[in-house]
Image (cartoon, rainbow, N blue to C red):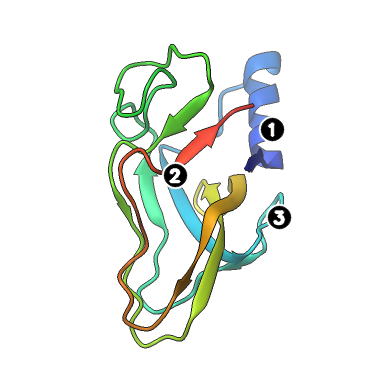
Amino acid sequence: MADMCDVMENDIIDVYMRGQPSGKPSTWSLRLYTAAPGETGGGTEASYTNYAAVSIAASLADMAGTQSAGSTTASSGTGGQTSNNNALTWGTAAGSGPQTLTHFAWCNSTTPWIRGTLTASRTINNGDAAPTAAAGQFTITAA
């Protein structure tokens, strides 16, 4: 389940109802958390050694249209869902103790626009393979 945060709600109102330019970035930051982020940030972002947020361009090539996973044309679907068109990799844990990933945030640089709970939590131990999401695996549904 994902929720829009204040900054995204404000941007939608300003763009579509008030005629203002969007404040959306050209590159998004997908961050993983061990405790839920709030409307304006907070929570506890993962901090194991080698962890880094994933950058995703705001583009047709990087995020699928609502008509189907993997699509690279403007959205024309009816379900309001998008997903990653490319595999995502966060970083291998090295020299750091266990952390359990439970939440995510879709951010401009650091401020969440969308936040949610991972479908399944994952514990990261020292030396574990990097957390990944195969193409089409990370989904966001506008509802």
Residue 60 rendering spot, x and y as whole percentages: 33, 26
- Residue 95, quarter of picture: bottom left
Is 13 placed above or below 53 here? Answer: above
Q: How far apart are the two marked residues, 3 and 2, measured between alpha carbons?
A: 18 Å
Question: What is the quadrant of the N terminus in the image?
Answer: top right
Where does residue 140 sit, x and y in percent of width and height? 52, 36
Quadrant hosting residue 82: top left
Q: Residue furthest front?
A: 120
Residue 111 can be seen, yes or no: no
Report the amino acid beneath label 3: Gly
Q: Is residue 13 left or right of residue 73?
A: right
Can you say whether 109 is above or below 76 in the image? Answer: below
Residue depicted at 28% across the width and 41% down the height: 86
Specify the label residue 28 is tagged with. 2
Residue identified by numbered label 1: 9
Percent position of residue 132, x then y: 34, 57
Q: Secondary structure at mark 1?
A: helix
Which residue is label 3 attached to?
A: 38
Q: Is residue 132 above or below residue 134?
A: below
Q: What number is the disc on residue 127?
A: none
Q: Earlier in the sequence, mark 3 or mark 2?
A: 2
First-in-chain label (1 vs 3): 1
- Circles 2 and 1: CB atoms closer than 8 Å: no
Q: Tell me the crowding category of disc 3: few under 14, some 14 to 19, or many 20 or more residues within 10 angstroms, Cα based.
A: some
Mark before the other along the chain sequence, 2 or 1: 1
Whole-number angstrom distance, CA of label 2 to CA of label 1? 16 Å
**Is 141 left, or right, of 17 in this rendering?**
left
The amino acid pointed to by label 1 is Glu
